[in-house]
Image (cartoon, coloured by chain):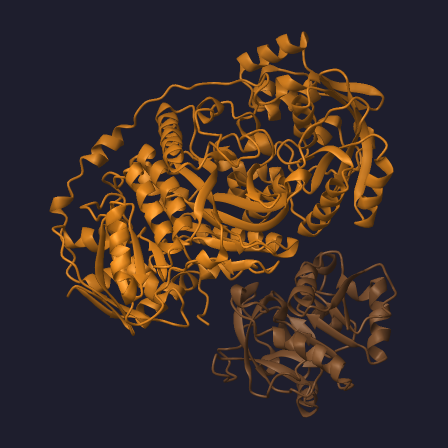
Chain colours: A brown, B orange
Amino acid sequence: MKFGVVTFPGSNCDYDSYMVVKDQLRNNVEFIWHKDSDVSGFDCIILPGGFSYGDYLRTGAIARYSPVMGSVIDYANNGGLVIGICNGFQILLESGLLPGAMLRNRSLQFICKHVYLRCDNNETPFSNRLSVGDVLKIPIAHTDGNYYWYQADVDELERNRQVVFRYCTATGEVTDKANPNGSANNIAGICNKARNVFGMMPHPERASEALLGSADGLAIFQSIVANATSGVTA
Amino acid sequence: MEPKITPELVAEHGLSPEEYEQIKSILGREPSFTELGVFSVMWSEHCSYKNSIALLKTLPRKGKGLLTEAGEENAGAVDLGNGMAVVFKIESHNHPTAIEPYQGAATGVGGILRDIFCMGARPIAALNSLRFGPLSEARSRFLFDGSVRGIGDYGNSFGVPTVGGEVYFEDCYYANPLINAMAVGICKTDRMATATAKGEGNPVFIVGSSTGRDGIHGATFASEEISAKSELKRPSVQIGDPFTEKLLMEASLGIIKDDLIVGIQDMGAAGITCCSSEMAARGESGIEINLDLVPVREDRMTAYEIMLSESQERMLVVGKKGKEKEIKEIFRKWDLNCVEMGKVTSGKNMKVWMGGKVVADIPADVLVLGGGAPIYTREQRRPAYLDEAHRHDFSTLPLPPDYNDVLMKLVTSHNIASKRWVFEQYDSMVRTNTVAGPGPDAAIIRIRHTSKALALATDCNARFCYLNPRIGAQIAVAESARNCVCSGARPTAITNCLNFGNPYKPEMYYMFSEAVAGMGEACRVLETPVTGGNVSFYNEDPERAVYPTPTIGMLGIIDDIAHITGSNFKSIGDVIALVGTTKNELGGSEYIKEIHDLVTGDAPSIDLDFEKRLQRFILEAIKNDLVKSAHDISEGGLAVALAECCFGDREHLIGAKVSFQLDLRADALYFGESQSRVILSIAPASKGSLTQLAASMNVPLALIGEVTSDRLQINGDIDVPVVQLSDGFYDSIGKAMHQPTR
């Protein structure tokens, strides 16, 4: 399969995602420039982390209007797989491909550290290699990762099983203390109703080699590949 | 209408009457107002190093593997093998931070990153060495919080991992905080760029951000003491834009990779002036520029303002003739300005045009360091307090009644406590090369697709330097090297940032001269040449000067990632070894400051030849796979170092039980800061080989105990649950910053 990694000006995890696909998954991968509007030929599009267009406005608010995003929205609406990581998740929220918004972390600070995530839905193209209840050690690095939506809408997310990952303790308990940023229901990653669009604040591409402290994030990329090769559609 | 030049105006520009006479004799006439501004910034301490360069030239600046000589280029470069080079440098941004911490610190990071990527190297790591007044003071908390946010926001957005450094709190930094930013990059040796302008007719471009009125006279401001009037200099502080910097890096690396240019230099202090004159002087060429072409942010900017602006995120590029179109195309891709504003000429002068008139016409080399800029050796006098401090008699100091209590106070003291409140605000992992981020002895960055890694550390115990500048500087070099060695790296080269008070005060100049001498001695013995750095004088206010603070940035190379060694104890039952000699030394220790409220005595002694032998032994033991963990003993002494080995991994706390007898004061034994000591943990089976190796290399080693489950027990004197020490250590600074623990 072929991955595409979008480079917005200010993206800074595009290379990291690219290298995980190339070196760890040994799959095909290409960068997609933000001024391009052709995303055909890709089996999965990664919106990487970073500070697109500087994020001096609300995070992701400008990236959403870049030429490439029009095509990514069409691609997603036609069932294409899209994963947004950190800033990529924020862009997915701004573009309406996923519901909700990000508030500033409750500490009002940028936070970079390893956290634990519990898998709550393994029936998605991004988590099919995991079991429900699996705990992954993956780092976060953001200022605006405090997931927020109206209570009724969060309830609906839960009913639809759109919450894929939640912040938890090392042993998998979902507690307030294990919530690094104040996210509603400890939400770390969600998918859309159709399961083909997925966003998460933690960085699985930073947890894909044991040398760097954890290889737990690799399961997410492997799930995408497994999904494609098994021919199961989302 | 330009102002008339009067003696008052000359003085306001920080130039002495003698220097002004020299300017007139160089030009053979009175300078124009713009020219006065140009001389003022170029001959400022900040740009000219006029009071330091004579001493800096005594430092060892050559060694195998060095690809540039100190001062030649924007940063030092070391051969890494495999056709790759490491480029690194540390620089201060103290004065701006004292009045505007967020932007001051942020632009410090921006400046040092540009120094790295204008060499053609992609930044792969940043570190910083920070010093503030005590956190009990609101002003210190304001400066600390603002600086950390500024460093974080800039580096995080730019996309460089901030992987290490140090933070200290001391009364002497209350008015003058120190912000030393270090950056490290890698490049291909055959694609290293140079900061040179040559080749008559080659086009000169200004690229990146537009030029505004910010930062005018920043270099001159940095060359005077902080005072009540400093607040008025707030407009001298530049404003950073990390987003533009990221684009500027990509475009700059693009034109270097495609071999389109002759030279490139970052516009830091003194902006266009400094770039044009330094690049021309280096290429023994002239340069002609037209300020009407410079993209500006405001109308009616004068030549003086454009020449002196320190607007950030700009570069001067000397292109290859005929490649203009390709250069412009790359900058267009990244949506950045790229304007041809001049040419390299055959003469020697920097000639500046505006509005059809020549506004400055000065021989480039008279402006620059190593050319015509003034060089002074100042009067020095040994400060009287030194002998008094060295005579201090510690034998009358009462022994503490409760050593558990002392240990708890030390692990929670802000100088020793975990800096996680700081480094969790920094992205330490972007670019996915960080093997060991902030916290342990040295940060470790792997070099992708090779078996190598870099170990990076900054170090300076300024209290030791205050009590003995020569020994203190030796210790700073030795400790940063030891930090690298404990990670499995061979110390390779240093960069340095020398933070001192006013050099016109003979006592201060003595301290500076001693510290430079000590640094040179240590670098010679440890074979870590000086690749460059920066001097920051005038870190004082009417009340006091900062402690002499020669911050060392050490680069170590790990040849095989299999040798990477951590500092935490690993498994219950492992044997703990103490390497080196513990002496009756309490001078300058964190213990006598925290418990007895004293900063006195002499710095601990150091035997550099022994230090070298110790470091060779540790590396040898690591390479022979005898070592499971290695940790340098520094602030807080042996007891604190053992505690750190137990709680270094907060998720996997572990204990230790040690016992040993030495004929020393108990407080010196547990908390003294004798140099050249390391704690190792080893598998029981390695005992014989390790002791044999130590004996054969003539290094004292004692097996003092073993790794246990959850308490730290030392002789009969200390017995504490590790979790209690750990909670104190990790939460202390957050509490001082009024953050709820989470």
- Could you say where residue B591 lies in the image, as x and y percent from the top left? 25, 52
Q: Does residue A61 appear in the picture of this structure?
A: no
Q: Height in image: B533 above or below B375?
A: below
- Which residue sits at x=42%, y=37%? B550
- Which residue sits at x=29%, y=67%? B574
* Res. A119 image quadrant: bottom right
Out of A212 and A198, give the one closest to the viewer. A212
- Could you say where residue B397 lies in the image, as x and y percent from the top left? 14, 48
Q: Does residue B128 appear in the picture of this structure?
A: yes
- Which residue sits at x=51%, y=35%? B531
Indicate the quadrant containing the N terminus of chain B: top left, top right, bottom left or bottom right: top right
- Could you say where residue B733 lies in the image, as x and y percent from the top left? 41, 60
Q: Height in image: B115 above or below B153?
A: above
- Which residue sits at x=22%, y=46%? B586
Q: Height in image: B453 above or below A188?
A: above
Out of B29 and B7, give the one closest to the viewer. B29
Q: Height in image: A133 above or below B533?
A: below
Is B103 displayed left or right of B225 in the figure? right
Out of B33 and B466, give the one closest to the viewer. B466
Is B354 displayed left or right of B636 in the figure? right
- Could you say where residue B185 lies in the image, as x and y percent from the top left? 59, 46
Of all residues shown, which one is farthest toward the bottom? A159
Q: How many marks?
A: 0
